[in-house]
Image (cartoon, helix red, strand yellow):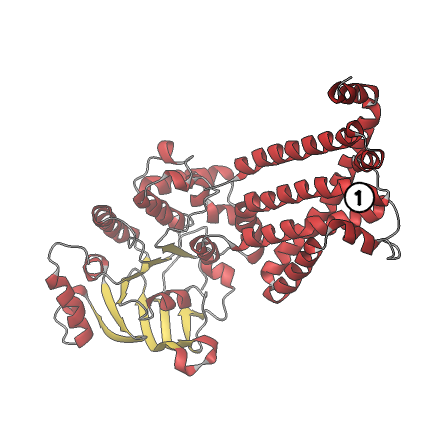
Amino acid sequence: MSIEMNTKPALPPTRTIEFRDVSFHIDNTPSRVIVYGISLEIPHGETLVLLGRSGSGKTTLLKLINGMLLPTNGEVLIQGRSTAAWDPIRLRRGIGYVIQDAGLFPHFTVAENVALIPTLENWDAARTAARVEEMLQLVGLDPREFARRRPRELSGGQRQRVGVARALAADPPILLMDEPFGALDPVTRAELQREFSALARRLGKTIVFVTHDLREALLLASRIVLLEAGRIVASATPQEFLRLDHPEVRAFTSSLAMTPGAPA
Amino acid sequence: MSPQINTWSFFADHRAEILGATLDHLTLVVIAMTIAILIGVPLGMFIVQRPALRTIALGIASIFQTIPSLALFGFLIPIPFIGGIGKRTAIVALVLYALLPILRNTYVGLTGIDPAVLESAEAMGMTRAQILFRVRFPLALAVILAGIRTATIITIGVATIAAAIGAGGLGTFIFRGVALVSDALILAGAIPAALLALLADFLLGLLERRLKIS
């Protein structure tokens, strides 16, 4: 089973992403373990939110999925194959990636940024152009107005929209998002969260979303996985999550209660 | 007759020789800069991938830059093959001088890129070569060009001293003018050299601004 770039995946496997007892530590120094004993199955079409404080290991889990990090112990399977066995370039071209600062290429126009993977995959010009237009419309940017702009001529929210469009351009079955709305002002953030929530339901992709914002997790997740110091301490649907009796869960839910109407 | 008129008439009488010396000078600079760029830019790209070699390469380049130019010419003269009196030695010295700004700016330009850009390039499945040539290099171009500009101006200046070892160029007028205590002769070398430096600075500055991406 491989990630098909140019056609829709035929019959999606149930377990798109699977962590099997994964640990990761830097320089093989056990004292510097970043994540411990992670076992996690992420079925096709799920929007899994990895919630946790800074340094809890959320971003490390994301990078273990697209092979930017390889597990020290255990294995991460993507569509049944270990990330260590995948060609990292093929693996990553089938996994969309959106980060906090969008990471758009400043020397590319918006259209060129969105066209990045189609270009690397040698799509023909007409197909790429049509796809860029489709993607910009999908994220609510008028192609006629935005296609030729440079990233520096965009607002933070617009840059994030382009980041999402770029990640989706080659129609990857998996989308990884690392606090994509974290640097935006509260109003723009709420707007993008609402729109993205609707978009995620419509696209039916497997999404792994990292945040430290419980409100965002509750809005977007089909399942919330809570990390504390590199371990999974809770895994539940948003409804169940609020009723869990774990100190770290209560720490997050009480932060929600203490700041009514304010962004976390 | 005032010295100024004297200078002007000297310029008018010797314009063919002045032009010839300017072209000689420019040839020295262009050859030296071409070699320095062909060594400096690829070497800069290489040490980005090999941090262990970075300190050594930048260290050696700074040593050459620190040696006074006349002394560097002196050191090169007795060296077989590259040394001796004449253009070849001068070009070697000029390349050694120009190397540091080019090498350093290539390295700084390639490493000073927003980590978020590099992270997303890697995560999107670009190969190392694609990241180097399509992301790092275009984004570093303005900084690399600033190094080339600095090196060019240094080279135009140092090339006037190359006349001391028989390399020709505008320095010939300056040295001869000093020996004969002739302002006109000195200025016949100094003015075109200064104009060359200013012109190179202006043109390369223009190019640099066009390539700059904020």
Where, quadrant-wise, is the N terminus of chain A in this rendering? bottom left
- Residue A223 shown left or right of residue A80 in the figure: left
Residue ID at (50%, 63%): A88
Instruction: Examine the rendering and report whether any part of residue A255 can be seen.
Output: yes
Amino acid on which the number 1 mark rests in the picture: Ala
Which of the chains bears the disc numbered 1? B
Q: Residue B68 location in percent, x, y?
A: 72, 52
Residue ID at (85%, 33%): B180
Residue ID at (17%, 76%): A247
Q: Residue A180 location in percent, x, y?
A: 32, 54
- Residue B152 shown left or right of residue A92 in the figure: right
* Residue at the disc numbered 1: B162
- Residue A249 shown left or right of residue B120 in the figure: left
Element marked by disc 1:
helix
Instruction: Examine the rendering and report whether any part of residue B31 can be seen.
Output: no
Count of picture labels: 1
Q: Residue A93 location in percent, x, y?
A: 46, 56
Q: Residue A158 location in percent, x, y?
A: 32, 42
B184 vs A74, nearest the viewer: B184
